[in-house]
Amino acid sequence: LSVVNASGRVLRTLSDGELYTAGEHELNFDGKDDAGNKMASGVYFAMLSVGGSESQLAKMTLLK
């Protein structure tokens, strides 16, 4: 699960390769990129990649 900008650049990786059991899960996003810098308010996308060949995008808005 990653946070990407409109051009598709990965800004934050929230989960990478961890295995989860079936069901609902929750991950927290603190509005910072992988380097720890605060991200600007704006539109970003949550990208969920499964198995390297499937992915889903969800639009989200970061407000400060």
Image (tube, helix red, strand yellow):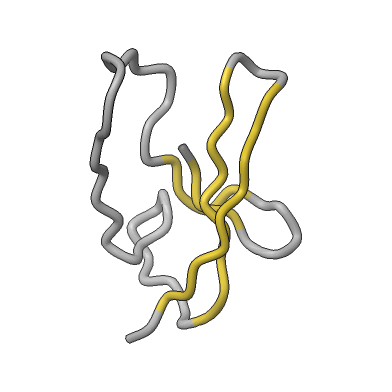
Question: For residue 24, which quarter of the picture?
Answer: top left
Residue, x 30% and y 17% (percent of image)?
22
Q: Is residue 7 left or right of residue 61?
A: right
Q: Which image quarter: residue 44?
A: bottom right
Front one among 44 and 13 = 44
Residue 63: x and y in percent read 38, 83
Q: Is residue 26 left or right of residue 37?
A: left
| Viewer-closest of 14 and 35 | 14
- Which residue lies at the image location 67% right of the left edge and 52% below the top edge? 9
Q: How many marks?
A: 0
In x, y percent, where is residue 40? 47, 79
The residue positioned farthest toward the bottom in the image shown: 64
Furthest residue in direction front, as rendered: 23
User: Where does the C terminus fall, quadrant-wise?
Assistant: bottom left
Instruction: Estimate the x, y position of residue 11 in percent, counting from the top left.
Output: 53, 53
Q: Residue furthest right?
A: 7
Residue 50, quarter of picture: top right
Residue visible at 33% across and 58% down in the picture: 36
Q: Is residue 55 above or below residue 40?
A: above
Above or below 6: residue 27:
above
Q: Where does residue 15 sit, x and y in percent of width and height?
A: 37, 32
In the displayed structure, 45 sits above or below 42; it is: above
Q: Which residue is at the front of the view, 17 or 20?
A: 20
